[in-house]
Amino acid sequence: MTTTENRPIDTAHPDWAARPTPDSPEAWVRRAREVAEILAVDAAERDRAAATPYREVQLLRDAGLVTLLGPVEHGGAGLEWPTAYLVTRAVAEGDGSIGQLLGYHYLWNWAARLVGTREQIAHVEAEAARHRWFFGGAVNPRDADVTVRDEGEHLVFNGGKTFSTGSKVSDVTVLEGVLEGPEAPPDTHVFAIVPSDQPGLTFHDDWDNIGQRLTESGSVSIAEVRVPWSDAAGFVDKKFQPRVYNTLNVPTIQLVFVNFYLGIARGALNQARSYTRSKTRPWLHGGQQRAVDEPYILDTYGDLAAKLWAVEALADQVAQEALPIHRDPDAVTPQARGEHEVRVAAVKARATEVALEVTSRIFEVTGARSTVAELALDRFWRNVRTHTLHDPVAYKRREVGAFLLRDELPEPTWYS
């Protein structure tokens, strides 16, 4: 995979700095759709190049999307998660990789609020909004090989992670490791936000997967990265201050997944629809003069659109249900957290299935000529298929079933 800066995005983007700042959630979603239209122009070409998306991330900055959740007094938009999910979905319509990068950025930008102390939250959110930081994360939970050493006033991170989404395009990286030493409580995880361009972080150019090729999700080596104890998220006097809200990272990022899956699916359906309208030929034995009059084509588009719209509506509803949790973190109960996770699991299962179905079945209604490499309609399926392997969807359905039949709340883990 090449590491050189990619070619300019073909369509010149508007001078957003000279335009009024969006003043409502709906206006921010419209801004995101503008970004998606720009990304869609050469998405197939950039997917083939698989180059580091410096310009794409700059596009997100220029549009103001990176500070969507930041405090207004420091230059952010001061909006909430339902809008962030919709913005992520909209951007993913144009380019699934960039939608994922933006959604992960929102989660890691929010990490201070999930885990940190009040002082840490205020500092990180102010700096992130003021400097328009773009966040990456080296927090792959299945890799347990990052250790954290206590050196008095500092912590020292060492090890590596298989995946580090955002890597070279990020300004800061969220690190996670296990505190070692005889006095450390067992399985004590430490999170810290560090500059990405320091010598102690080496991002390896080994992300060469079939999909989500521009997410910079390769491995990272971590060598003697020093962090003040004051930057260890949620620790006071070297002791972690637990809250139920600390465990909301999983359902929050799973809803990020849901929304860029749905964005990719809608992007696939839109591109297929455009192709069918302009290029797909009717079957010579079907008796129709136009592909748009073919009964089986009409049925397939109606089926796929109905399924997609239904899951979009469920995703929006679940996002709204989470608002009381995010607005009053100190009041979150295990029951409220568990019931929310069940709803997230349900929509994650449906979004996975629908996105895979839409992105694979569009070929049934576009025809053989739509498989040309230049069009790259397959990238939508490759993107969804790659990321939906993040964690088995069967376990999401199991969570829902156990709740319905046994009143069993999901145990908070790295995946539930």
Image: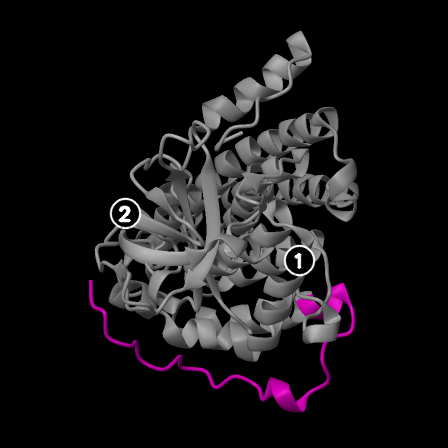
Residue type at mark 2 is: Gly
Say which quadrant the C terminus sits in.
Answer: top right
What colour-coding does the image apply?
A: one colour
Q: Position of residue 159 (x, y in %)?
A: 27, 46
Say which quadrant the N terminus sits in.
Answer: bottom left
Residue count near mark 1 (Cα–Cα under 10 Å), binned few <14, some 14–19, many ≥20:
few
Q: Which mark is residue 119?
A: 1
Looking at the picture, tell me which residue is in the foreground, 404 or 252: 252
Q: How many numbered discs, if any?
A: 2
Q: Position of residue 277 (x, y in %)?
A: 50, 61
Q: Position of residue 170 (x, y in %)?
A: 42, 66
- In the displayed structure, 276 sits above or below 323; it is below
Regarding residue 277, the answer to whether it shows in the image is no
Which residue was labeled with disc 2?
160
Distance from Cα at disc 1 to Cα at disc 2: 29 Å
- Decide if residue 27 is on the left or right side of residue 267: right
Name the residue at the bottom extreme.
Answer: 18
Looking at the picture, tell me which residue is in the foreground, 312 or 172: 172
Give the residues drawn in magenta, as a range. 1-28
SS type, badge 1: helix
- In the displayed structure, 176 sits above or below 196; it is above
Main SS type for the magenta part? loop
Which picture quadrant has residue 302? top right
